[in-house]
Amino acid sequence: MKTLMLKADQTDQAAKIIKNGGLVAIPTETVYGLAADALNGKAVAKIFEAKGRPMDNPLIVHIADVSQVDRLVSEFPPKAQKLARTFWPGPLTIILPKSEIIPDEVSAGLDTVAIRLPLHKTARELIAKSSPLAAPSANLSGSPSPTNARHVAQDMNGRIDAIIEGGECEVGVESTVITLATDPPRLLRPGGITVEQLREVIGEVEIDDAVLHPLAKGQKAASPGMKYKHYSPKANVILLRGNSGLFADYINARRTENAVVLCYTEDLGFLKLPCIPMGKSNDYAQHAHKLFASLRIADDGGFATVYAHCPGTKGEELAVYNRIIRAAGFEVVDLEK
Ligand code: AMP
Ligand code: MG
């Protein structure tokens, strides 16, 4: 299959492909999505094939206006409406009991559906011209999510109908996922909207075990995506916890290795291995923005090992922690010891 490259103003052409049951990669403010008509089960099935995604991992349905929610769900409770009013359009996905028009391919057999209203203008324009779009990240299953059209082409060229070129994704990590199908509501995946922000609006929000910890053998995942090895570059990722002096000592003792360091701006000049700067140590939004692109740079450079600071687990840091701890197989080297 030849994959068309479309400009951001070619949403008419993209809408035609979607209506004909095809696949189009689209820019959003989180990461690039691989979109199909969410109400066409056959089209949605092609997403799983193109990505090599396990069929039991459900997809997020993207809408262009809050008025589209009612058709997709059997219930839109007040707390969900409050979240939608506060954080949409934006990087928040809300899980609700689904209506019967949601194909099984979208919800992977669950009785719930995940819904998001993205901020990105091109994404919303395309949805308005076609249909609600089922769209996971536009990478091959298991590799880092794409944050520009070039990353998408690396993984998807020849496998999908078209890619819309829409520049760099602003947030850089996937949306925050919260389920309102449980009481209290539960955070299933951290992202650009923090759990602290969610609690300010609706009160109690639990954090699902799988956000911070590996699933125990046989434990069922509330969010099926969490059980798969995700966000992994080919390189071995090693996380280091400790102050900048200890970090530099550890790195510099390994200066002959085929390794690269995801470092803070403040580390630059002190490290004797190649570095990929992630922004200032306290610029958490920038760390998220650069994370996946940096892991791809590491792989493109053929490095065997990636060393990185271990992020904290509060506020904005949780989103990066959740991704990078998986890439590191949940292991952290404690430099204080
Ligand atoms: P992705 O599409 O790759 O950004 O991943 C979407 C994430 O949302 C995955 O972790 C899914 O398992 C999760 N998800 C989507 N729909 C549901 C649902 N109905 N219930 C629980 N988790 C869901
Ligand atoms: Mg994904």
Image (cartoon, grey):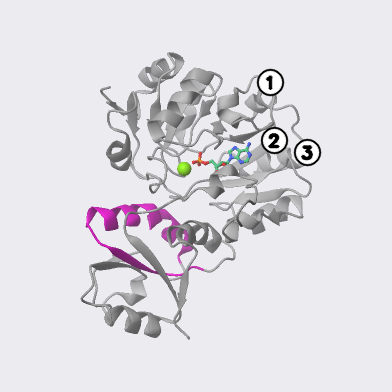
Q: Say which residue appears at 43% left-offset and 43% top-offset.
A: 31
Q: Nearer the viewer, residue 201 or 237?
A: 237
Examine the rendering and report whether any part of residue 324 can be seen.
Answer: yes
Q: Which residue is mark 3?
A: 78
Q: Nearer the viewer, residue 231 or 126?
A: 231
Cα gap from disc 1 to disc 2, whole angstroms: 13 Å
Image-quadrant location for residue 248: bottom left
Magenta extent: 283-311
The residue under label 1 is which amino acid type?
Glu
Q: Which residue is mark 2?
A: 96
Cα gap from disc 3 to disc 2, whole angstroms: 12 Å
Image-quadrant location for residue 281: bottom left
Quarter of the image where the N terminus is located: top left
Q: Is residue 153 above or below residue 197?
A: above
Q: Residue furthest front?
A: 218
320 left or right of 154? right
* Residue 287 locus on image (x, y percent): 42, 61
Depth check, mark 1 against mark 2: the one in front is 1
* Residue 195 locus on image (x, y percent): 64, 56
Mark sitting on residue 100: 1
Q: For the residue labelled by badge 3, is the local secondary structure a helix, a strand or a loop? A: helix
Question: Magenta includes 292?
Answer: yes
The residue under label 3 is which amino acid type?
Pro
Cα gap from disc 3 to disc 1, whole angstroms: 21 Å
Q: Is residue 97 above or below residue 30?
A: above
Examine the rendering and report whether any part of residue 279 can be seen.
Answer: no
Q: Is residue 27 above or below residue 19?
A: below
Q: For the residue labelled by badge 2, is the local secondary structure a helix, a strand or a loop? A: strand
Image-quadrant location for residue 146: top left
* Residue 272 locus on image (x, y percent): 24, 77
Give yes or no for contact between labels 3 and 1 (Cβ–Cβ under 8 Å): no
